[in-house]
Amino acid sequence: MKKFYAIVAAIIFGIFIFSACEKVEPPYIDNNNNPVPPDTGNQSVKTVLLEDYTGHKCPNCPDAAREAERLLETYGKSKVVVIAVHAGFFAVPHPGTIFDLDLNSDAGTEWDNYFGISNVGNPKGMIDRVEFADGRILDWGKWDAKVSEELEKNPQIKLNINNSFNTGNKKLTTTVSGQFLENMEGDYFLQVCITEDSITGAQLDGIDVIENYVFMHVLRGDINSAWGEKINDNGTTEQNQEFEKTYSITLNNDWVPEHCNVVAFVYLDSDKSVIQAAEQAITE
């Protein structure tokens, strides 16, 4: 009898193991009966670059900055990278006054002049520098829809940033690497720059002056020139083609390393449209 029960138990156990190990085909279902996409390992995602052109004497610019922060919260930092570009009339510092903070940069001024953004009137911005049907230079109320539209695109390139920072001499070494995910035509450039968060200073907000306003994502400067460098040859790229660039700079003494980030993005030279962006803190 004991032998009979042992055989029955072994059969039941075998059925259980077979059922548990049986292959389950997607789509998978979570506890709320929602489909769950299968894990594909190191999956690339499209990351959108949002450029917010601003200035400390611009009364409506804080509304745009708040919208940028809301979009970061909505989509996540893996999907959106923000650069706040202080340039043009509203960003001019006035020594000896409350608006003496200078957040301008050479790269930001060059971008502003090229795209003509502050001439239109801040606050304005660009989403991946794309020329949409309603234009490239966008009011902040249009940013959400354009970010969503860009996120629907498949990623064309993987982009990775690896930072090493020496706290003693404030030397930053950053390596930016990438891999094209499809065959592509055109000249592609890599742009690398530095942004800084948590800078305090005076900001006009409507009719009020906020003396201890906190500026985020401020473009501090470029690392590889205002327009970066070409990363493909002969105007073509092949799927799985890779590149890697390493740069070393010494941070300005006025910058706080713990608040600084390296931002990198790849763009098509012919129309300046950005196909991928990435951001990595200088220190962890």
Image (cartoon, helix red, strand yellow):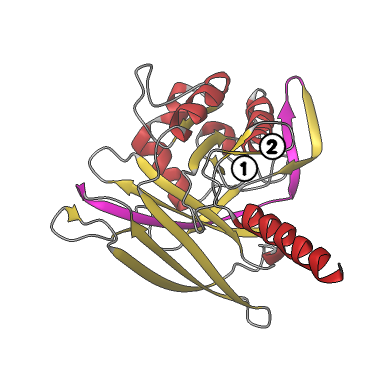
Q: Residue at x 80, y 33 (%)?
A: 210
> Total of numbered circles in the picture?
2
242 lies above or below 250: above
Q: Residue at x 44, y 72 (%)?
A: 247
Residue ranking furthest to the right: 2
User: Where, quadrant-wise, is the C terminus in this rendering?
Assistant: bottom right
Q: Is residue 134 visible?
A: yes
Amino acid type, label 1: Pro
Q: Which residues are magenta?
A: 184-207
203 inside magenta stretch: yes
138 lies above or below 181: above
Residue 157: x and y in percent read: 37, 52
Disc 1: CA contacts within 10 A as few (<14), some (14-19) or many (>=20): some
Amino acid type, label 2: Glu
Q: Is 122 situated left or right of 109 in this image?
A: right
Residue ranking furthest to the top: 134
Q: List the residue tagged with mark 2.
A: 73
Q: Dot 1 lies on which element?
A: loop
Label 2, label 1: how far apart the Cα atoms are: 31 Å
